[in-house]
Each structure stands twice: as structure tokens, then as C-alpha cells.
Amino acid sequence: MELCGKKKLHALSLAEKIQVLELLDESKMSQSEVARRFQVSQPQISRICKNKEKLLADWCSGTANRERKRKRESKYSGIDEALLCWYHIAQAKAWDVTGPMLLHKAKELADILGQDFVPSIGWLVRWKRRNNVGFGARHILASPFPTEPPPPAPTPQAQLPLSLKDFSPEDIFGCVEVPLLYRAVPGRAGTCDRVQVLLCANSRGTEKRQLLVSGPQAAPRCFFGVNSESLPASYHPDLAIPWSKWLSQLDRDMGRQGRQVALLMAARVVEEVAGLPGLCHMRLLPLSAASPTPPLPSSVVRAFKAHYRRRLLSKLAAAQSERAGTSLAEVAAGITVLDALHMAAAAWAKVPLHLIVSSFIQEGLAPGKTPLAQDQASEVPQVPGGLSLEEFSRFVDLEGEEPVSRACKEEVGPADEEGGGEDGFEPLPTKADALRALGTLRRWLECSGTTPELFENFYACEEGVERLCCL
């Protein structure tokens, strides 16, 4: 006799667990109804609710595998970490790393650590999956210094702090928390549109740490179905920067590279993390709020914000041209935190290396005798059409003004305006959707009289999408 209505017992992936939390938060469905939808038991849904904070932290960390259903850690964690450190060094030196090479190196490291361990193909496959390691085309690192002629000597008043003289310029980092009104338009900003962005770079501009964006929403709807590991920046579901977690990760990264670095920070943050144990590879150097020297040069921060504002206006103008009679403010309402994360990452990538170098030297935060001239160091993006230089300058510094106070609402994207899919979520795009979109984009470029350079960028994007579709 065949049993009817029997639930299929299976474990949910991290992505499915986040979807469960979103359904419970944003709909009136009970735990039993959600359990029936996902074909699991109600106690399993209850356990997911109890672990909500941990699941959201994993989802937003950018390091968790969203398809992994159970968290199994390797019993040889020391070998795991040592091999990953060696792999990153090999990547930096553009070595052609192969599977047999990794197996041989893992055995060498096991012998050094005194562990009785013989790596197998299965272990290597699991190690690659845990650490998101994939073999592909090698990336040759470009020269980290510009080939421009030497600029004039620094001003005599720039004095290097005594505590920094023990570090090379490559090992001096500055970090700062930047408030950003991510969907503001000229003359209009709201308190609900604020996120915090953590910028960090070394004084030679050769290392820009991945951005951390902190927002007020625990699980923004725009992140539904998104693989957070592939994002160019990480998202933290709280306006407060998670300093302890971020510093611990930075310390681990420096430890893998065998480095000792100095990190310039605001004094209040250093006091906040004073009891944080285990920072073995960093020296935290506090700068008080009264100090004229910021922990990351103000010209670097302003260049980042200028690039972000210009990218935002460009995006809004393109959307406005498609929706006749719509104001910029109305179009800006459709900008999501995920849009802001991508635009912030693009803006950070556009901050030029020579600006970072000269700014650190002029602020007296790094040694050097040849900072760039002031007109070169103040490089900012071209002023968008329709705004004067003064108006754009005010727009860049909009966070310094008093924002308009209004009721905070859940952000709305284009999918919500059109009704969205089931339960209000936009259906996730398939591989076929992605390939069709590439065809549409190429056809539009063909009919728009674009440049060969833009086609080259399109070909690179097309190749990357097609490679992902084959996985």
C-alpha cells in the first residue's frame, strides 16, 4: 500500500534556509505551511528560526557556500590553512598550479606539521570546494607602480609618525568608516537611504581591501537568490561596522602571508576593540577625532564618493530616459542596497593608485619624497552634464548636510513595481535567460553605433557568462 502525503525528508541548503526566513518575515505563513512548501518537518523550520542570526551572518559574510547543506569542517584544519596560504602565494606569483602539485604540497606540509596524512583526490576536491578554489586562466599581476615621471618633493611639514617608521610603506594600511546616502539625488536625501562603507588600503595603493557595506536591513529582498560569495563587496546586516570580525579576518590574511602590518584607525574604534584577543600580525595605531590627520586620507575618501555619485547619476539618467515624465527622485527610489554595493565596488576600483600614494605621503602617513603634484592628486571623475562643478561638489559632500527625515519603508525595486513573482519575489533568472539577455545586449550594441572598445568589454563578459553556464 502506497503512503500518501508523506513528507520528503531532506536537508535545506543555506540559500533555501534564507528563503524560509524571508517567507516567515514577510508573509503570514505559519511554520507548518512553510514546512509543507519545502517538504521538510516543522521542527526543522523551528530550528532554522532559532539559528536565524547565525544563518544571516553566514549568508552576508561572503565566505559561506550557499549550496552547502551541512557544515563539515576538515579534521586536518592546519594543513587546510597552510595549503591555502601557499596557493595564494602561487597565484600572486602567477604559477601554473595543478592538482598533482597541490597534492604533493599538501603531503609536504603534513610532514612539516608532523601529521600522519596522505592526501587523496577526494580530499583535494573537498578542499577546493571548501575554499572556493578553481583552476583557470592565470592572472598576471600588473606592475603596482605607475610609469609617470617623478613629481615634486613633499612639503617639509609632512612628518612621519614615529610608530610607523618600523614598517615598510606596503605594510602601512589606513581604514575609515564612510557614511553614504546611496540613492540620493542632487538637493534631495533621506535618512533611510544611508549605509556605512568601510574603506581600507595600504599606503602604496597596491592593496585595496574588499569593501564592507553595512545596511539597516537584516535580509534585504534584493539579495534573494544571490550568491554572496561572488559579490565584489560583502554586506553586513547592521549599520554598525563589525570591527571585531573584520579585524580578525584581516589578521588571518596577514598571517597567511607572513606579514606584520600597521593599521591606522579612529581612536574610538581602537578603544572599542581593545579586548579583542589574537591579533598577532597587526599593530593598531589610533588617531583621535581632534587630529588633523584622518586614518585614511580625505582626498581618497572624496575620490571614492565622487566616482560613486557620478555612477549613480549615470544609472539614474539611463533609467529616466526609458520612463518619460519620471523625476530623478522617483527613479532613485528603485535603487536597492545590492545596486549600491555594486556601484560602490566600481567606484573603489576607480580610485587611482597614484592618488592613494600621494595622499598618504602628503598627510604624513607614509614615507616618501615624490608625491604627485596637487592638481594630479586631486583627480576626480568628470562632472556630469547638467551640473556645475560647484553643484557636483555639494552633491559629493551631501552626507555633511542635514538629510530629509521621512518614514522608513522596505526598499522597492523594479520587480516589486511590476508585481514580482510568487510571494512578491522576482523569479530567479535561468541560464537560458542569461544567454538570451546576452543576445539582446549584443543586438542593441550592433544597432547603436558603439565603439570597438565597448565590444571588447562585451566579449569578455559574454565569455565569462558562457563559462558559468557550462558549470
Image (cartoon, rainbow, N blue to C red):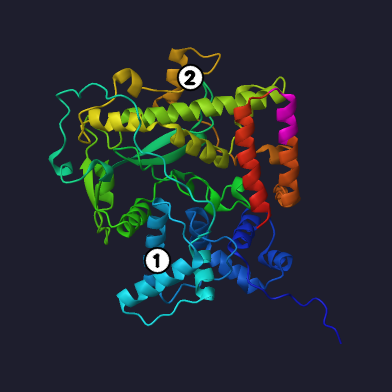
Residue sitting at 57 percent across and 66 percent down?
68
Residue 54 percent location from the top left of the image:
49, 62
Given residues 224 and 23, the one toward you in this image is: 224
Q: In which quarter of the image is residue 87?
A: bottom left
Q: CA–CA distance between discs 1 and 2? A: 45 Å
Amino acid at circle 1? Leu
Q: Is residue 388 above or below residue 216?
A: above
Task: Identify the mark at residue 83; answer none if there is no mark.
Answer: 1
Residue assigned mark 2:
382
Quarter the N terminus occupies: bottom right
Quadrant (top left/top right/bottom left/bottom right) for the C terminus: bottom right
Question: In the picture shown, does residue 19 fall above or below 410?
Answer: below
Q: Is residue 254 above or below residue 349?
A: below
Please state if 371 lies on the left or on the right of 460 as rendered. left
Image quadrant where residue 294 sits:
top left
Between tags 1 and 2, which lies in front? 1
Is 58 left, or right, of 148 in this rendering?
A: right
> 421 and 93: which one is in front?
93
- Residue at 61% in and 30% down: 454
Question: Helix, strand or loop at disc 2?
Answer: loop
Q: Does the magenta stretch include residue 226?
A: no
Q: What residue type is labelled 2?
A: Gln
Contact (Cβ within 8 Å) of mark 1 with mark 2: no
Q: What element carries label 1?
A: helix
Question: Quick one: label 1, few (<14), some, or many (20+) residues within 10 Å?
Answer: many
Q: Residue at x 34, y 53 (%)?
A: 250
**Magenta segment boundaries in residue numbering:** 441-449
Q: First in sequence: mark 1 or mark 2?
A: 1
Provide the major secondary structure of the magenta segment. Answer: helix
